[in-house]
Image (spheres, rainbow, N blue to C red):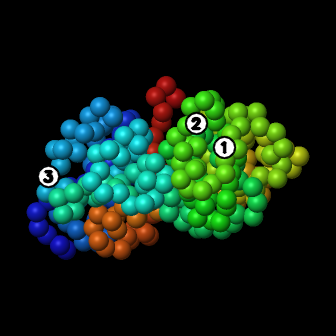
Amino acid sequence: MTVGPITRAAVLGSPIAHSLSPVLHTAAYQAIGLAGWSYEAIECGEARLGDLLGSCGPDWAGLSLTMPLKRAVLPLLDHAEPLVGEVGGANTVVFAGGARHGYNTDVPGMIAALAEAGAALTGPALILGGGATACAALAALRGLGADGATVAVRNPATAGALLAAASRLGMRVRLTAFGQEQHARDTQLVISTVPALAADIYAKRIHPSALAPSAILDVVYHPWPTRLAAAARQAGAVVAGGFELLLHQAARQVELMTGKDAPLPAMRNAGLAELERRAAVPRPGS
């Protein structure tokens, strides 16, 4: 085992108590043999982000970022990989050489999750939601060979950041009102970036005469399966879930922060065990 000074890492966001990232990263450190590494969840909103980054000294390796921080962190970075600029969001900060380096591991995480499930892009794609994760989904579709997508948003007037990301990515986007688009029968891939209940309207539409995708990626990982994922699976579609996305994006973060290969099996086993534990815990009032 590698023993030395404590090296810190964390996931930031709000709310953050539910995050599975500490389980995945801690399992990785244990499997790699990094006994002096720690990873925690820290509640942090946009207003606190600058101060928290400024408080990270030489004992910090990096940070994972979730909502609402993926866009807010951009002006606080010293360097960023090109994908960060294209997507308009970073979910990873690595401290190296006295500088803050930004990365986006959501995009390769989505591509890996779809590949692991056996999903292939064979036709038009539909993205549900217009936030930072939807921008990452556009980049993932580009990586799969697409040149555009339909994006369902609640308010097209607030889709400026999404459209700007599409322009930077060289992707065509057709905006449609959430839950109201027509002619969806040729959609082959659906990527849902919205909360589980928000996608229920699409779960009800999965039918050969309405919405019949060959594959779905739902970024939710708990509770699982979502109604969308269950309906898609029952209809014979390939389904990739939020856990696979979280696992693969976390594995890339581990590699960026530690410089070592991510122990994917150990991370997967720890994450699934934690999800099983959570599923067995009675909900308040039940």
Q: Nearer the viewer, residue 2 or 275?
A: 2
Marks 1/3: CA distance?
Answer: 41 Å
Residue 159 marker:
2
Q: Amino acid at mark 2?
A: Ala
Figure quadrant of residue 61: bottom left
Q: Amino acid at mark 3?
A: Gly
| Above/below status of 198 relative to 100 | above
Number of marks:
3
* Residue 236 % position (x, y): 77, 58
**Left or right: 199 as drawn, with respect to 245:** right
Marks 1/2: CA distance?
Answer: 10 Å
| Above/below status of 46 relative to 98 | above
Q: Which residue is mark 3?
A: 57
At 52% from the left and 40% from the top, the residue drawn is 161
**Furthest-left residue in this view:** 5
| Above/below status of 108 relative to 131 | below
Dot 1 and dot 2 residues touching (CB under 8 Å): yes
* Residue 139 % position (x, y): 56, 57
Figure quadrant of residue 269: bottom left
Q: Nearer the viewer, residue 274 or 15?
A: 15
